[in-house]
Amino acid sequence: MTEKKRPHKEANRITHILDTLPPEERFPVNVKKVALELTPSFNDDPITEVQGHSFNKFEGALLKDPANPRWGIFYNTNIEHTGRIRFTLAHELGHYMLHRMDAGPDGFECGTNDMLRYDSGYVAQEEEANAFAASLLMPAHDFRHQVEGVRFSFDLLGHCADRYNVSLTSAVLRWLEFTSKRAIAVFSEDGYMHWAKSSDKAFKSGKYFATRGGPIEIPANSQAAEQSFSFTARDGIRHGSGVWFKDEEVVEHTIYSEEYEKTLTVLLLDDIGGYNQLDEEPEEDISDRFSRGF
């Protein structure tokens, strides 16, 4: 039986090679170059093409040549934001590294939800491709160096988004993997949560939003419900118990994108401080940047 491949381990194989590059060439990761130049050294069925096309139904695709042992990655040229394109390419490379042996005749065609759904229990292969992409673009050792010992702010995560050329949302979600704070990211539109993700400590303490069970309304007294940008909301507003959680106060950091009519919120439940000390991956703008894309 073939051993199941793990997203972070596969991403780390590439990270160790990229870490030998000169500092000025290390970030952001050139995913196209990685796919074309490294996959031939890994496998007998490499990626030989990375191209953009105008698609209506999906953001990215990993397709197999029916006549030859080779693959191609394709991305939607209608995507305007380089951070989303970079994540899309890394997501499809993740499918190649992790799932190509299980691919059907059509390969993988991934839509917007496949790139933006981070709630637990979503389609396993899409979760794994997202995990691979995040680990490749924002490797653990470097990301930790950027955020360790620094108080949460959208400015901090905006710096990370710039360094890795990813969306602010991607940087926030990566931060959740490292923080030892009880924190929750919420992505909402039209007054309802699209998805929510809790840090490990928040989840274990019972603080999460089960968005898989159906739409959850944004609390009426929250800043996220306002759906309008303010510097005060971006920098954090303390709410008493009964707003987000009936039994706890929270500090709410919220940014709203008028262009996309979507809101990104980070809730901090208490001030534990610090970051997980991980030598390797676990196994298993600011307002302007956000308005330009997620």
Image (cartoon, grey):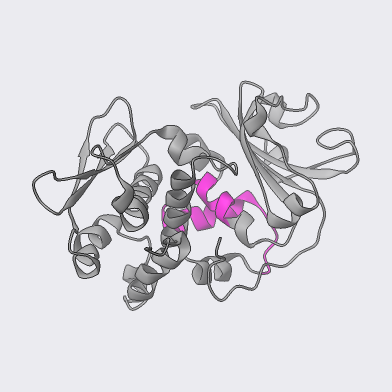
Q: In the image, 137: left or right of 232? A: left
Determine whether, in the image, residue 252 is placed left or right of residue 56. Answer: right
Q: Is residue 246 visible?
A: yes
In the displayed image of the protein, which residue is found farthest to the left? 67
Q: Quadrant of the N terminus?
A: bottom left
Question: Whole-percent x and y of residue 179?
Answer: 67, 61
- Viewer-side residue, 291 vs 148: 148
Q: Is residue 156 magenta?
A: yes
- Identify the residue at the far front of this view: 1
Q: Residue 99, percent across and down?
A: 35, 52
The quarter holding residue 244 reads top right
| Quarter assignment of residue 27 | bottom left
Query: Is 254 above or below relative to 89?
Result: above
Q: How many marks?
A: 0
Percent x, y of residue 235: 70, 46
Whether residue 285 is visible, yes or no, is no
**What residue span does the magenta drawing correspond to?**
149-174
Residue 216 percent coordinates (x, y): 70, 27
Left or right position of 190 against 71: right
Relative placement, left or right, of 7 versus 74 is: right
Q: Say which residue appears at 30% left-offset and 31% top-offset.
A: 78
Along the viewing direction, whichever of 56 and 10 lies nearer the viewer: 10
User: Magenta: predominant secondary structure element?
Assistant: helix
- Nearest to the observer: residue 94 or residue 5: 5
Q: Residue furthest top?
A: 190
**Residue at 77% across, 27% down:** 219
Tell me the residue at 39%/48% (across/down).
87
Look at the image and say whether residue 150 sits in the magenta stretch: yes
Relative to 133, residue 291 above or below: above
